[in-house]
Amino acid sequence: MSEVKDYKPSIEELKKELKRENSKKEYRTVLRNTLFVVVVVAALAVLISSFFITVLKISGDSMTPTLDTGQIVIAQNSSGFEPGELIAFYYNNKVLVKRVIGSPGDWINIDSDGNVSVNGEVLDEGYITDKSLEPTDITFPYQVPENRYFVLGDHRSASIDSRSSVVGCVTKEQLIGKVIFRVYPFNVFGGL
């Protein structure tokens, strides 16, 4: 029978093995902490986007010159809006952005030249380039129903908005929030 000798590692080999084991332990700790941070950040991003802000990409010409196709904006979730503010809302599985003109109970009138008045006061609409009554199929003066907002696009001749019974006034259930900030392109970055 042959004898088997016991192998005894050297101090250097033991140090290398200890270092390797410690490195594996450190790697697992760093990986676990990194995954934890990623999950927490993702959860916070989902919560913030669900309850506080919504990021939207503009498509279409109904809000030119204020907003152009391809621009990215942020809407802050909100339930109260002032005339002149931009809002985002759901319509037929799409998100539309329009300007609030009238609140519940307001009387809206648009004359044949496209001048808009709310409760008898003509609005100074420096943000539009073309005034237009069309396209419309409702009768003016028009009273905004309860829990609804009368909205118009800034490019009046190209916008389908509350002047049309197809879109009508925006209900509180349709609302996403107030459009407050333009993120992209960077040359027009800033508040709205």
Image (tube, helix red, strand yellow):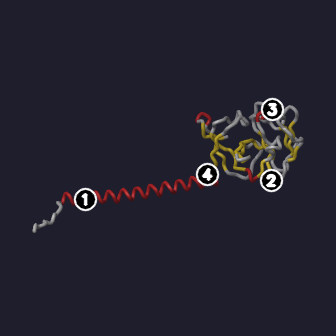
Q: Which residue is mark 4?
A: 49
The quadrant of the image that shows the C terminus is top right
Q: Residue at x 47, y 58 (%)?
A: 36
Count all numbered tags in the image, as a single digit: 4
Q: Which residue is mark 1?
A: 17
Q: Disc 3 and disc 1: Cα gap in Å?
A: 80 Å
Q: Name the amino acid type tagged 4.
A: Ser
State the SS at label 3: loop
Few, some or many C-alpha atoms within 10 Å of disc 1 (few <14, some 14-19, many ≥20)? few
State the SS at label 2: loop
Q: Which residue is mark 3?
A: 131
Relative image position of residue 56 (x, y in whole percent) = 64, 44
Relative image position of residue 106 (x, y in whole percent) = 85, 47
State the SS at label 4: helix
Q: Is residue 31 left or right of residue 135?
A: left
Q: Disc 4 and disc 1: Cα gap in Å?
A: 48 Å
Q: Which residue is mark 2?
A: 147
Mark 3 vs mark 2: which is more N-terminal?
3
Q: Is residue 78 left or right of residue 33?
A: right
Q: In the displayed structure, would residue 53 be above or below residue 187? A: below
Q: Mark 3 and mark 2 in contact? Answer it, CB < 8 Å.
A: no
